């Protein structure tokens, strides 16, 4: 009796399907997954669509049909009685042939997983698998003719019919590149008896003192076997149990339960350790020979989405509670990390999550216009303690719900939820991205209070998916994980700031508010908001090859900016806020990144300020749009496609620290308002001098009360002179909330405020914050600013004789492998600012830029 074996197929070749007598081209790599764009680039058939204007020249690829083939060995003398081909994902409209004789599979859903019985169909020796991929564009257009047109707000309308990564059709940050290919691994599994699926369902008591791990497993066995289950605790404790399984040619199910006293718990980053129980399931024959085994890592945690009335405010809260501790979610939205998914590596996911953690983020939202991500992302989020908000794969469209579509979506949901349910980092499934918002925009007919569960005959048929089919799947296959019908969702509509989550796009989109009014835009949970910024110059040089095209409004850079409003809105926000003396590319990059950082910093501080303790969780989290890019582009990302951090990354990192300070500036009239004013309160002909009032607060995001020394200083920006010291001494900072420290501090429009938090034991700086008159374009800077930078091994020390805004340090030349741990900082007199820098040497040349350095 032999052990089950697995062979992962690789060594692909490809050709255009609808081209007569086309020769096969062998992939230059030997990876198990591939796709047509990367293979065409490798073969130099097409130019890299990420470079220059090449996107325009490769659109024919998505209009064509393609095919892939690979050969694999099968040993006919194998003692295994059963052979199966397992497909982890096919992108998208695929017909699969085995040895040119048998059509073994048709798939029209990129998110389906397939297990195909090929017993008796394999030849001894070499076998050939061939897959024909039909153009998803043509397929979608055929479905559109058959079932009608449904409105889509990015890409063509036909995408609503096709279960393919929707961003492939083009988005307001991504290109139109309709790729295809064997995007998931394909494996030949041969066995007599094998485990098909294992799910370890961990439940914990309300008091956290006892837990159970119910180990459920599906198997196919050709004889009586024993399932041995071992659970090993993080502290080394071992639990054993076993169950008998009888002969079955179909899947048979077994279940064993383990009771654990005083379990060791998994926590999100910043709240406790990330520990796991190892669950090992093995099936063993009568001779005690192991036939197959599967291992799972299980994190035990108690999860709640808390939506309850608040003290003194309308609506309800919206925050996550892990192990009975409220968690403020400070994070980002995640889009697919590449337009060509097979180009992503496990290291790419590890690096991305590491950057999130270093930015003091504890949540990622896997956005619905992309994919159900690779296991590597969720594994790393589990390991690092990053919570995951998981959208189902619907975004910005009016989707259908005819029977065939509903059926394929249900199977998709089952396949993906079963795959993902083992990850303890996943704390929410949401039905879609902005589809209720689309329904409102299109004035679709629907009543929120109609709970009939079937809306397929209305003009909002997909509501049946979001409120019936998908929640039913989550309830059955991932019990204990909350379900949210969509994002945004709640209250009287998708813009209700008092219930559920909102996407706050009234900065950039919508009413295009001034970002200084972000404190009037906060909701119970802000799951999207953003501001666009250019990538760094080093990145632009990589995708704009002609130096003559390296200016802000060039044809190439415009093509690499897909945003609605694009340069017009970006210009509006830059020119409204900054003095612009030059429009050379380096100056524009700095200006757009500074505005992006300022905007996101205002937003993060405003949201976090509203986390005020039990009964006062007026904002339970904010998720920045977005953390990453899928190609080289000017976008809302804080980290560009090549992994370079924009200024916003550092600015929001400081705002999201476990111990942080915040400062705000307003007028008495504005401070009273709960929403942005309906009209300008200070029209151009109001010539009276302005007096502003400032508040200072501290956030303690840890689970322990703290004490800190708080220093507050007011500086004359034009001279650098200290106007006033308003330090308030040692302050108590209760755990897991924001504490107001100073209210209505009076300042004028030429005063900058610096706040410093120091450790009471040794005086070292824990946090800094500053506030400047707004807009910055009106500020009179010191004419004799003197910035000095001391370069040491592994760090910089920065000093200035007057307040300095947005100081950025960089190594020249920029191809040196130096990583700054902080940047885009405000510098004040008599305060040495130390920036750690991995790889920095004391003889490195360091360049400095700050707001006004080019005036």
Image: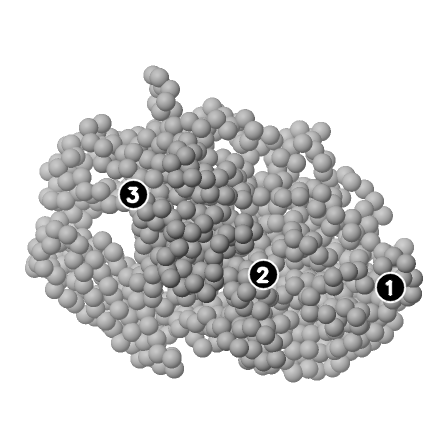
- Residue 780: give x, y in percent of width and height: 88, 57
Question: Does residue 587 appear in the picture of this structure?
Answer: yes
* Residue 206, numbered label: none
Q: Look at 59% across and 50% down and name the residue there.
A: 637
Judge depth for marks 2 and 3 and give the one in front.
2
Q: Look at 76% across and 44% down and name the residue there.
A: 587
Judge depth for marks 1 and 2 and give the one in front.
2
Of residues 811 and 49, the one drawn nearer to the viewer in this rendering: 49
Which residue is tagged 2?
A: 495
Q: Look at 68% across and 54% down and name the residue there.
A: 511
Q: Earlier in the sequence, mark 1 or mark 3?
A: 3
Q: Using a 10 Å C-alpha cutoff, classify the residue at mark 2 as few (fewer than 14 neighbours), some (14 to 19) or many (20 or more).
A: some
Q: Is residue 149 left or right of residue 548?
A: left
Q: Using a 10 Å C-alpha cutoff, classify the residue at mark 3 as few (fewer than 14 neighbours), some (14 to 19) or many (20 or more).
A: some
The secondary element bearing badge 1 is classed as loop
* Residue 87, numbered label: 3
The furthest residue to the top = 21
Q: Earlier in the sequence, mark 2 or mark 3?
A: 3
The secondary element bearing badge 3 is classed as strand
> Which quadrant of the view contains residue 546?
top right
- Residue 246: give x, y in percent of width and height: 9, 59
What distance separates the C-alpha of mark 1 from that of mark 3?
65 Å
Which residue is tagged 1?
A: 750
């Amino acid at each position: 009796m032999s052990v089950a074996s697995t062979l992962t197929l690789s060594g692909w070749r490809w050709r255009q399907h609808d081209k007569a007598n086309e020769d096969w081209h062998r992939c230059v790599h030997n990876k198990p997954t591939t796709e047509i764009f990367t293979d065409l680039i490798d073969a130099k058939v097409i130019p890299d669509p990420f470079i220059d204007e090449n996107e325009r020249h490769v659109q024919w690829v998505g209009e064509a049909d393609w095919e892939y083939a690979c050969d694999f060995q099968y040993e006919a003398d194998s003692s295994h009685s059963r052979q199966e081909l397992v497909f982890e994902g096919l992108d998208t409209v695929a017909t699969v042939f085995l040895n040119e004789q048998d059509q073994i599979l048709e798939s029209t859903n990129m998110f389906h997983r397939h297990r195909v019985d090929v017993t008796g169909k394999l030849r001894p020796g070499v076998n050939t698998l061939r897959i024909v991929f039909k153009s998803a564009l043509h397929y979608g257009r055929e479905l559109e003719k058959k079932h009608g047109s449904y409105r889509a707000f990015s890409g063509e309308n036909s995408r609503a019919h096709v279960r393919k990564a929707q961003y492939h059709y083009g988005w307001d940050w991504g290109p139109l590149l309709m790729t295809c290919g064997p995007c998931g691994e394909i494996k030949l599994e041969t066995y007599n008896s094998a485990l098909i699926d294992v799910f370890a369902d961990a439940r914990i008591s309300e008091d956290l003192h006892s837990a159970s791990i119910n180990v459920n497993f599906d198997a196919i066995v050709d004889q009586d076997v024993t399932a041995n289950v071992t659970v090993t605790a993080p502290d080394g404790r071992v639990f054993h149990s076993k169950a008998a399984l009888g002969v079955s040619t179909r899947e048979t199910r077994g279940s064993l339960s383990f009771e654990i006293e005083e379990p060791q718990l998994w926590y999100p980053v910043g709240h406790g350790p990330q520990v796991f129980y190892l669950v090992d399931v093995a099936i063993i024959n009568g001779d005690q020979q192991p036939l197959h085994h599967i291992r799972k890592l299980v994190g035990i945690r108690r999860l709640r989405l808390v939506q309850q009335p608040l003290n003194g405010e309308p609506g309800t809260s919206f925050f996550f509670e892990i192990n009975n501790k409220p968690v403020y979610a400070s994070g980002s939205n995640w889009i697919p990390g590449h337009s060509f998914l097979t180009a992503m590596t496990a290291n790419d996911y590890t690096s991305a999550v590491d950057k999130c953690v270093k930015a003091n983020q504890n949540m990622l939202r896997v956005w619905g216009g992309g994919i159900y991500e690779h296991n590597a992302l969720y594994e790393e989020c589990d390991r690092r303690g990053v919570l995951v908000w998981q959208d189902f794969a619907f975004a910005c469209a009016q989707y259908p719900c005819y029977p065939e579509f509903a059926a394929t979506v249900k199977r998709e949901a089952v396949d993906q939820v079963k795959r993902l349910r083992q990850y303890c980092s996943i704390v929410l499934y949401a039905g879609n991205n902005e589809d209720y918002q689309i329904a409102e925009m299109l004035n679709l007919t629907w009543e929120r209070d109609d709970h009939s569960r079937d809306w397929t005959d209305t003009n909002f048929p997909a509501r049946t998916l979001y409120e019936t089919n998908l929640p039913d799947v989550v309830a059955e296959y991932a019990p204990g994980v909350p379900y949210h019908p969509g994002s945004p969702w709640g209250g009287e509509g998708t813009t209700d700031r008092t219930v559920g989550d909102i996407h706050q796009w009234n900065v950039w989109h919508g009413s295009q508010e001034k970002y200084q009014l972000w404190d009037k835009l906060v909701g119970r949970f802000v799951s999207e908001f953003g501001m666009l910024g250019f990538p760094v110059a080093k990145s632009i040089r990589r995708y704009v090859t002609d130096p003559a095209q390296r200016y802000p409004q060039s044809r190439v850079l415009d093509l690499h900016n897909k945003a609605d409003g694009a340069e017009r809105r970006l210009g509006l926000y830059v020119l409204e806020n900054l003095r612009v003396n030059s429009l050379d590319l380096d100056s524009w990059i700095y200006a757009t990144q500074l505005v992006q950082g300022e905007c996101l910093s205002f937003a993060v501080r405003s949201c976090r300020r509203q986390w005020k303790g039990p009964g006062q969780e007026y904002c339970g989290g904010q998720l920045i749009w977005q953390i990453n890019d899928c190609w080289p582009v000017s976008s809302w990302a804080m980290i560009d496609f090549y992994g370079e951090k924009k200024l916003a990354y550092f600015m929001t990192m400081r705002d999201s620290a476990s111990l942080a300070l915040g400062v705000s500036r307003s007028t008495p009239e504005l401070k009273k308002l709960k929403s942005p004013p309906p009209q300008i309160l200070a029209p151009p002909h109001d010539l009276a001098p302005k007096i502003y009032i400032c508040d200072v607060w501290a956030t303690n995001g840890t689970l322990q009360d703290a004490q800190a020394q708080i220093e507050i200083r007011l500086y004359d920006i034009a001279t650098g002179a200290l106007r006033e010291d308003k330090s308030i001494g040692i302050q108590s900072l209760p755990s897991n909330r924001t504490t107001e420290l100073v209210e209505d501090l009076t300042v004028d429009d030429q005063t900058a405020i610096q706040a410093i938090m120091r450790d009471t034991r040794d005086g070292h700086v824990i946090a800094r914050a500053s506030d400047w008159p707004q807009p910055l374009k009106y500020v009179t800077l010191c004419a004799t600013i003197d910035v000095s930078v001391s370069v040491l091994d592994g760090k910089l020390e920065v000093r200035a004789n007057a307040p300095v805004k947005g100081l950025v340090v960089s190594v020249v030349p920029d191809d040196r492998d130096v990583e700054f741990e902080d940047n885009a900082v405000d510098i004040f007199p008599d305060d040495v600012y130390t920036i750690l820098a991995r790889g920095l040497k004391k003889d490195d040349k360091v360049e400095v830029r700050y707001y006004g350095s080019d005036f």
